[in-house]
Image (cartoon, rainbow, N blue to C red):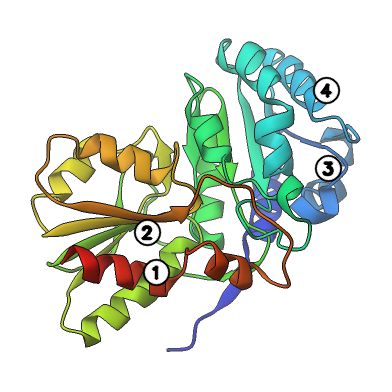
Amino acid sequence: MMKKYSNQRRAYGEELVALGRENPNVVALEADLGKSTMSCLFQEAFPDRYFEMGIAEQDMLSTAAGLAVSGKIAFCSTFAVFASGRAYDQMRQTISIGRLNVKLCGSSSGLSDFGDGSTHQAVEDVALMSAIPNMTVFTPCDPVEVRQAVRAAAAIQGPVYIRVVRNDVPELIDPSSKFEVGKLRTLREGTDVAILAHGVMVDEALEAAETLQKAGISAKVVNVATMKPFPYDEVKALAGQVKAIVTAEDHTFIGGLASAAALALRQSATPMDYVAIPDSFGQSAQSSEELMKFYGVTRDDIVKKVQALL
């Protein structure tokens, strides 16, 4: 069946506008990247509730903290590398310690910003945000799940980080399905191996499962849209249903899905391996696909890891 592709960033902007129509307390802040993060859609709809902070993520989050204290639900957006790195102190010291109602969308994450190189490719943002107490971290796999994550974020009292990519991705989630915070989402059943993935790697995992099926291997594909609170108990239970587990992510293996799954499986006899970016920065390339191949985070790499384990 032909896949339908759409953009996570536009889904974020459109859902933010929908929220704004329903709730006058929803406000948006931007760090001079509104046309890229698509928060510009909110600016067009509600110019009096949109705050362009310029290239100053620290000021953006500090201002968002003040708005949250005054009763607003503040959605901030910028590139993921700046959201998680440049404004880390403000997110930790003011927003998370105070459990303030600030939502941060990290756009163009992972290797999706292929042309701008290592300075703009957030390969460690999930680790940084997950390490902060009181933080919720969503890594949606497609535009449908981005919309669901935005809704879930607005309903949570406290800080939330949402990770989205730059390029168009296939729609994988049924819009009528329920998004549950901290729960796994099985997209394909299987009995031999479980492939846990998040973000753009969910589609890679599904494609890998098709290849494995032709080789006589039954692969369950599980979408991990909530990286924090991480579903440790569910992953542990999953180990008793299959012969092996492989994780897949466009993020460094340090502090990401590989690390969290390994912690969940620390007392399990089920063998595990991972597909993830090594302990290195990204680099410029002609496409994100070129980078994914170079760093070993493709459907073919998932297939190889599964076959090696089994």
Depth order, front residue of 140/272:
272
Residue 276 position in % (x across, y down): 44, 54
Number of the front mark, 2 or 4: 4
Give the side of residue 117 with respect to residue 226, left or right: right
- Callout 3 amino acid: Phe
- Callout 2 amino acid: Ser
Q: Is residue 182 above or below residue 148?
A: above
* Residue 186: mark: none
Instruction: Sort mark 3 into few (<14), some (14-19) or many (20+) by Cα contacts within 10 Å.
Output: some
Instruction: Sort mark 4 into few (<14), some (14-19) or many (20+) by Cα contacts within 10 Å.
Output: some
Residue 116 position in % (x across, y down): 78, 57
**Element under disc 4:** helix
Instruction: Sort mark 2 into few (<14), some (14-19) or many (20+) by Cα contacts within 10 Å.
Output: few
Q: CA distance from mark 3 to mark 4?
A: 21 Å
Depth order, front residue of 190/258:
258
Q: Residue under circle 1?
A: 301
